[in-house]
Amino acid sequence: MPLKIAIVGRPNVGKSTLFNRLAGKQLALVDDQPGVTRDRKEAPGRLADLPLILIDTAGFEDVHDDSLEARMRSQTEIAIREAELALFLIDARVGVTPMDERFANVLRKADLPVVLAANKAEGNQGDMGLAEAWSLGFGEPVGLSGAHGEGMGELYGAIRTALGEEAFEAAFAEDDAAEGAGFDDEILDKLAEIDVDDPNLSEDELTAALEAAGIDDAAEAEAQLAAREEARKKPIRLAIVGRPNAGKSTLINQLLGEQRVLTGPEAGITRDSIAVDWTYEGRKVKLVDTAGLRRKAKVQEKLERMSTGETVRSLKYADIVALVMDADEAFEKQDLQIADLAIREGRGLVFVISKWDLVENHAQKMRELSEMAKVLLPNAKGAPVVTLSGLTGKRVDRFMPAVAKVYDDWSARVKTGDLNRWLRYTIERHPPPSVHGKRIKPRYMAQMKSRPPTFVLIASRGEHMPEQYKRFLINGIREGFDLPGVPIRLFVRQGSNPFADKYKPGKKKKA
């Protein structure tokens, strides 16, 4: 199994910079001001050939009251207990400070190996601090630079020595999971080869031609079934988003049954997006707590802009987005913008109304919220509205079943035969409007992919199909195949012209 390392130290010594270096990605927020990191953040990483699980921690503050700094210290202590090795960072340019000495005493009491590293030691600027580091009593310090990647070989050797050969070799037993395939463009190519506008082609012949092209054959059906089973094995990537102080972190702690992320009355406590692996009734879930999203005009500070960017990135890479809203302020403009972004990115959506324990008339409030969701977000029609209290745990048990249902719908595939029977029934009742006096004739529909469900419709004069009729078909698919709360994508393609090869401009007819 990968080696779990907690990167610890006082504020502003470069822990997040080194975390990003070892992770190979800019996952943690980095800024010159101290105290940027607040929660502990985990990510896979690698040092040469050594696989790692990295834990970035908040800067150590020696306080024990009810303040935010004390809660940050508690998160660091938890990281130390969970880790197999502590990587203790000091600032080589500043040298050993009293805070470093107090934290060294904390690490001596912990039952785990410690590697001492003097960060920001590029060039000769950190020689004095590197010499002072010997006084902390953790053996030979490693001089390195997280920003420039210097000293990584020495760090590798120090970790190997601190662990011992047996524990070091055990870290190499890891399995890498492969990601699934993406958009299937081959279906469009196969459909383009079939003359769906041939007036002599019957429905049965059209279906036979499509099956001959391999679009709806038994092998594909088996592949689809295997893909669904594989989807259920993958973790549900669930992003908890919303405005500041809506109760996102409180909900995550209630789900996990522990104080995994910092909470409190202060708005904007969460800055980084914190991913936590969890299991719900046998299904793997990756919970992502995100920073609150305010209106763009109110985001002024550089650090908040970075937090906002990280939240949007987490939303884009999620499977399901849970939009958490305060019961008294639900569906305000910023909430609607977040929901619209989730739908445009193709994410499944669940509305979460938090602080439900403070609502007096539950039935009336629920009616109001349901009506607001229907009127203000018609493109999220049918998305579940879950009311709960993250603080007391009331009705939290309704949250994950709603998420699992949306995820299954988001991963669903519709049988091609059922889809086309629905299409024929729909256009008989509500045919597309004529454009410039000419009829638009839908001929065939197929599902190109799931996650989110994506369909292609082949129609004569398809490029002229009005957007209103496309939305009508999307809503019909959602209702006809029970896909509420799921964004549905529909591409309309025009069938090939059966007379295209029979006459070309400039070509003389034979006498």
Image (tube, helix red, strand yellow):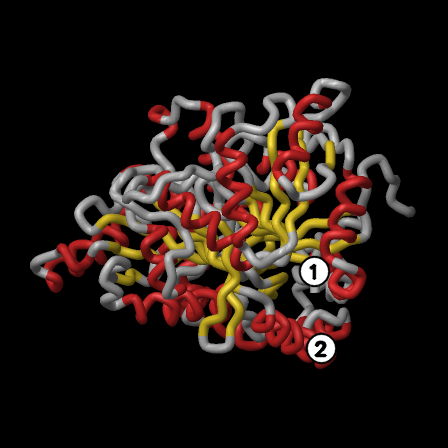
Please tell me the numbered disc located at residue 39: none
Q: Residue at x 25, y 43 (%)?
A: 265
As helix, strand or loop, the secondary structure at mark 2 comes to loop
Residue 102 percent location from the top left of the image: 49, 38
Q: Earlier in the sequence, mark 1 or mark 2?
A: 1
Q: Quadrant of residue 349?
A: bottom left
Residue 186 percent location from the top left of the image: 74, 59
What residue does disc 1 label?
A: 2
Disc 2 crowd rating (10 Å Cα; few below 14, some 14-19, many 20+) is: few
Residue 87 percent location from the top left of the image: 63, 45
Q: Is residue 341 visible?
A: no
**In the picture provided, is 194 more to the left or to the right than 310?**
right
Please tell me the numbered disc located at residue 217: 2
**In the picture provided, is 336 more to the left or to the right than 39?**
left
> How far is the residue under mark 1 from the one under mark 2?
43 Å
Q: Amino acid at mark 2?
A: Asp
Q: Between residues 447 and 73, which one lies in front from this camera angle?
A: 73
As helix, strand or loop, the secondary structure at mark 1 comes to loop
Q: Residue at x 20, y 51 (%)?
A: 327
